[in-house]
Amino acid sequence: MLSFLSHPPRRTNISSQKSFTSSDGAVTTEFLTPENSDGELMIRQTFHLKKIQEIRNTGKEPEIIFHREIFHWDKTEAFTLERGKLASHCEGRFHTYYSAVISFEAYPGWSHIFEVYSDRDDEDGVVTRKLENGEKFFRNLLGYLDDCQRANVQPDIFQLLLILHDNQTSLTVPKIPAKIRKFFGKWILGYIGGKIIGEKILGYKSSYPEYYLERASDKKKR
């Protein structure tokens, strides 16, 4: 309707890539095949901590690192720390995990955010994540954020809300009580902000073929 008001960055084609490095080499994301992930797709992210610090020293922040708390409506996201340390903020509590800890989970509705780091300058941080139907979500979210940083433009909040909403995920808004968090995130932010403003008015999509190729199985899950 008013798509001329939106200014999306030029999209990089990553849909056929099993792995890609983003943010000037700061993070490598791999989509593991079912054969080497016990039948369930896993996403492994390697945080090149020395590179991340170099970027931060310039006064910038790698946009590929999503510094906003989110929650999944009805899905559990499982994390496994393979190397380094992981600092998480989950449901208002801070935790530090070490690679000796096998995994932890963010249950449906739990607000969470995390950052991987290390006490060693020569060590990268590695974490794997499992989220049902997560490949579409992560490819679109990470691909969009990285293209925004590459084009030196700020991500559009309405595009982000749409990507999140159509993957049953919402931003966490501070001071919104947990008991109405899902309603507010799903209907106020996601439906009004993402579907109506982002999709209907600004012409954004929740998924782009440059980031993710739709499959026949995706239609059955809707």
Image (cartoon, rainbow, N blue to C red):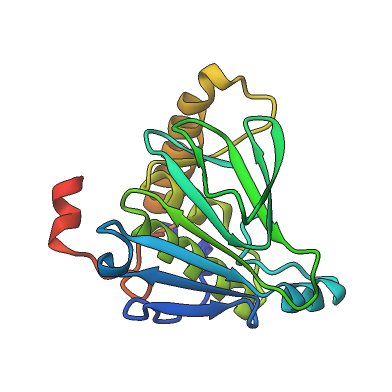
Q: Nearer the viewer, residue 107 or 69?
A: 107
Q: Where is residue 70 in the image (x, y as percent from the top left)?
A: 56, 42
What is the quadrant of the C terminus in the image?
top left
Q: Which residue is drawn at 45% across and 48% down?
A: 164
Q: Quadrant of residue 204?
A: bottom left
Residue 27 visible to the viewer: yes
- In the orientation shown, which residue stands out farthest toward the top? 179
In the displayed structure image, the side of residue 35 where residue 149 appears, left or right: right
What is the quadrant of the N terminus in the image?
bottom left
Q: In which quarter of the image is residue 28?
A: bottom right
Q: Position of residue 21 (x, y in %)?
A: 54, 80
Q: Position of residue 93 (x, y in %)?
A: 70, 32
Count of marks placed on residues: 0
Q: Residue at x 85, y 77 (%)?
A: 58
Q: Which of 9 and 34 is in front in this view?
A: 34
Q: Residue at x 46, y 25 (%)?
A: 183
Q: Residue at x 70, y 40 (%)?
A: 95
Q: Where is residue 180 in the image (x, y as percent from the top left)?
A: 52, 19
- In the orientation shown, which residue stands out farthest toward the front? 100
Residue 71 in the image: above or below residue 184: below
Q: Which of 6 and 102 is in front in this view?
A: 102
Residue 11 visible to the viewer: no
